[in-house]
Amino acid sequence: MSLSLCYQISVINHSVSRWCFASTPLPILCQKCHELGISGLDLLTLDEIPIAQENGIECAITAAHPDKNGVGTIEQGFNQLAHHVALHAIYEKLIPAAADLGVKQVICFSGNRDGLSDEAGLENCAVGLAPLIPLAKNHGVTLVMELLNSKVDHPDYQCDHTAWGVALCEKLSTDHFKLLYDIYHMHIMEGNVIRTIKDHHQHISHYHTAGVPGRNEFDATQELNYAAISSAIANTDYVGYIGQEYIPTTDDPFEFLPRAIDLCSG
């Protein structure tokens, strides 16, 4: 079976994280996406979204738009009460701006613990996010918090286990707050990827990929079986995107991308 046919019958929507191909001009990246049956780009800024759309590619989820003090970055998120005023100012602009561009998902982060217990951080996140939920609902937007590992890439990040993220989803109890389940990050933190997806898929609205170890291409030298994982995702009747977020190691950064899409086509 040809790769092109695999793309045509796949039940998975495919996207690529912009930052992994940052050296490629956005219009050229969009052209590559078209060639490979990729319909979305992840983590675009508000300025980049119209460029992608003009080239026939949708923004699957926005980038973060932190303020000049770094509030809104991975490290400075909703788990600190002191950040809430600034975060509300950011997202009160970002949510309607994304909606005006037709984007349905806006990323957000817990922030680092900085000594907070998981219980306190969870409560603070709920307090900070709750006032934004009506705005998100009114604009048809979902706030999506990314699960990241704190062992290797993001030391001290609080939303570093699926159970913590699920508890926050249950506390907020809304379809307008979900999780970005990063397969690479959560394999490092807890493993058991397929079981976790089966048990908690209702709280997940986006997925990211990368190889373990290294966060690079996920070929036969890697631990994760993306064909099995994408099949498990497809079996949950998932209708969102699987976003490729591996860091290319080859001279041609697109060399592995056709294989990545094939492996992640459910």
Image (cartoon, grey):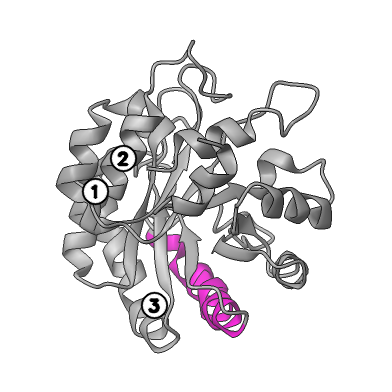
Does 96 sit above or below residue 55? Answer: below
- Asked whether the beta carbons under mark 2 and mark 1 sit within 8 Å of each other, the answer is yes
Disc ID at residue 231: 2
Judged by depth in the image, the label closer to the viewer, 3 or 2, is: 2
The answer to whether any part of residue 13 appears in the image is no
Disc ID at residue 132: 3
Q: Amino acid at mark 1?
A: Asn
Instruction: Kindly report the distance in space between the C-alpha atoms of the residues bearing marks 2 and 1.
Output: 6 Å
Would you say the magenta stretch is mainly helix, strand or loop? helix
Residue at screen point 56% across, 51% down = 15
Judged by depth in the image, the label closer to the viewer, 1 or 3, is: 1
**Which of 111/185 is in front?**
185
Q: Return the disc, 3 or 2, that comes first in the chain's sequence.
A: 3
Which x, y percent locates residue 88? Answer: 48, 74
Q: Which residues are magenta?
A: 81-100
Does 183 sit above or below residue 89? Answer: above
Indicate the secondary structure of the residue bearing disc 1.
loop
Quarter occupied by residue 202: bottom left
Does 215 sit above or below residue 68? Answer: above
Magenta includes 83? yes
Indicate the secondary structure of the residue bearing disc 2.
helix
Which x, y percent locates residue 235? Answer: 24, 48
Q: Which residue is mark 1?
A: 235
